[in-house]
Image: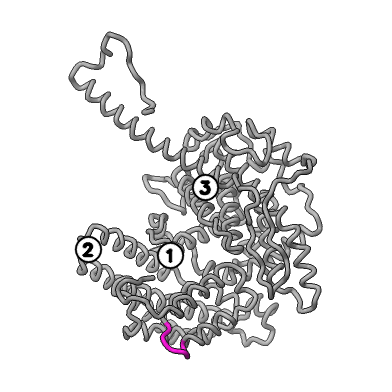
Amino acid sequence: MLEIDCHYDADRPNWMDSGEREKHITQQIKAQVEQNGKTRRGIALKEKIVEDLSNTPKNEQILPTPKPNSSSIRPIQLRESKEPQEAKPSDLAYREGISGFKSDSDSPERFPALREQSARLDTSPKPTAKPLCQDLGLGSETPRSENDMAFIIGYLDYVLPSLFPFYTPSIIDGGRSRVLVLATKNNGFFRGIVALSAYFFSIVPVSSDPTHKVCAESIWKELHTQVTSALSTIHRDLIAVDGRGVGGSLLDSVYLMANIVQYLSFEIAIRSGKWKVHLTAAINLFEQILQVHGWANGSKSIRIVLSKLLNTNPGPRPDKSNADQGIFNFFSSILLVNDMIPSTSLGQPPKLKAYYSELEGGDRPPVLRTEDILGCESWILLIVADIATLHAWKKEVSKTGVLKTTNILSHATSIENRIQDGLKRLDELDASRGKDSVPNLKTYLQYPTFPYDLGSSIRQAMDDMTSIWSYAAHTYLLVVTQGWDLSDTPIRTNTRKSMQLFQKIFSPCWLRCLVWPICISGCVAVNDDERQAFRRIGSSMQALQAFGTVDEALTIMETVLSNDKIGTKSWDI
């Protein structure tokens, strides 16, 4: 059980001399027991992730039931096909590349070599291993159907801008083509994009004519196949990377992490309830990538991983990032955001706080940009994460009965000062900002009548969104520290100022990035005018309400508003 050497001979080992040698060996054994314990726990976690990703029960509903007013489509059920299917070249490549692989439905227990392979996850690279995309036969020559390519273009043109409207990398840095590059290399990622696009176009009308309903019904029939293929590929890639070790290939590990994060986005979009499984898997893999590839000169950072990705695939210019760096940067940013915000509802501290400093930058520009994901600056999201940590700590200490109010207020005062300093800085920027004097490419293509101020308009919107997040975070902090007191003057001020700023956010896609502040601020609305205002904000997102967490947030808001028995001290966020 302890996985250490045992001595059964009658003679004592020569190192048992009651001296320095015995003391030294004893320390070695203790260290070995501790390390083996960590290894066993790591293996158990990895096997659990593999099991969760692969074992989808029969007849389990993976997609949500469409609303009656959107279409009359029945939900898709995941079930095993009763008809034999012809093996595809990519499937055969999987079977040749992974020892013991028999079929997509095999569970981890049916892989005799998996348990032994898992133990090597953090060990040295296997030099003979080929890139995963080569093992799986997933190069650019992989045939794609006309429908597949239409969904990919639809994803780049509509879905990605709807999910991340502020993710607009310069064409000099490759633009959004980085996502397309990964789709050509990894079939699971490709299928995940197709599935997400299919779901998006099934609920968001492409046109106002009756053909949308017919088109949506056709899409839902195809959606099950795409989802099953994407999830199966994640499972198989996970086993392959697990077998060769994260150290075996940095690129394979990065592609797998991006694949899992992409599927996490799909899970959140369809509100399946299983997103926490993929969030845990992505966080686990991200931390292992940093542990194996992120060390240099005694320190560990995301910047080091990015530098190694540049060495594996140099870009056209030494001062510009390549596609692999862009992929890791983008999906790592998504992962960190999904680590921060859900922690406020899960009642637990974020798990990746050790890497949050790389969102700040310091003397150098930050490595990751949350502005690309949510349109708001990183500092306020870091504050939200700190409040979630304070909230979890307060709950834990309260169980012991030794919670001191002075400790809570001390931490809260420090956080509150940071919020006020950030809002003051935003006000100063607003007063000093001028207009762009030189038009850019987007000005020509999208806003031909704009007076060359598109860039400043977007920056102004991002400042407003950061302020909205700040007011909601302050309300969150006040409720955590003082309880549910809706008559509190700062809470009323935060709500009023948020409502004023919401009137300046005209894009439904931008409002989607504000779901958390909408929920927080809407829950503390006290009169009919405020409540109707937040209801109008929610309804202005129109069809996008059904895409992601918007509907759920609005439901929470309505549930809280309809509850007139909320205790001032017993309720929190």
Q: Which amino acid type is marked by label 2?
A: Leu
In the figure, is residue 162 to the left or right of 398?
right
Crowding at mark 2 (Cα within 10 Å: few <14, some 14-19, many 20+): some
- Magenta residues span 525-530
SS label for mark 1: helix
In the figure, is residue 77 to the left or right of 461?
right
Residue 529 located within the stretch drawn in magenta: yes
Q: Which amino acid type is marked by label 3?
A: Lys
Residue under the image location 76 percent in, 79 percent down: 208
Tag in front: 3 or 1: 1
Residue contact between numbered discs 2 and 1, judged by CB atoms under 8 Å:
no
User: Circle 1 sits on which residue?
Assistant: 345
Question: Residue 232 at x, y = what percent?
Answer: 65, 46
Q: Which amino acid type is marked by label 1?
A: Ser
Q: In terms of depth relative to the viewer, which is nearer, 323 or 227?
A: 227
Residue 113 located within the stretch drawn in magenta: no
In this view, which residue lies farthest toward the top? 10
Figure disc tally? 3
User: Circle 3 sits on which residue?
Assistant: 308
In this view, which residue lies farthest toward the front? 565
SS label for mark 2: loop
Q: CA distance from mark 3 to mark 1?
A: 36 Å
Crowding at mark 1 (Cα within 10 Å: few <14, some 14-19, many 20+): few
Question: Residue 225 at x, y = what percent?
Answer: 72, 53
In the figure, is residue 55 to the left or right of 8?
right
Question: Residue 148 at x, y = what percent?
Answer: 76, 57
Q: CA distance from mark 2 to mark 3?
A: 46 Å
Q: Earlier in the sequence, mark 3 or mark 1?
A: 3
User: Circle 2 sits on which residue?
Assistant: 403
In the picture, which quadrant includes the C terminus?
A: bottom left
Tag in front: 2 or 3: 2
Vertical relation: 151 (above or below) 433: above
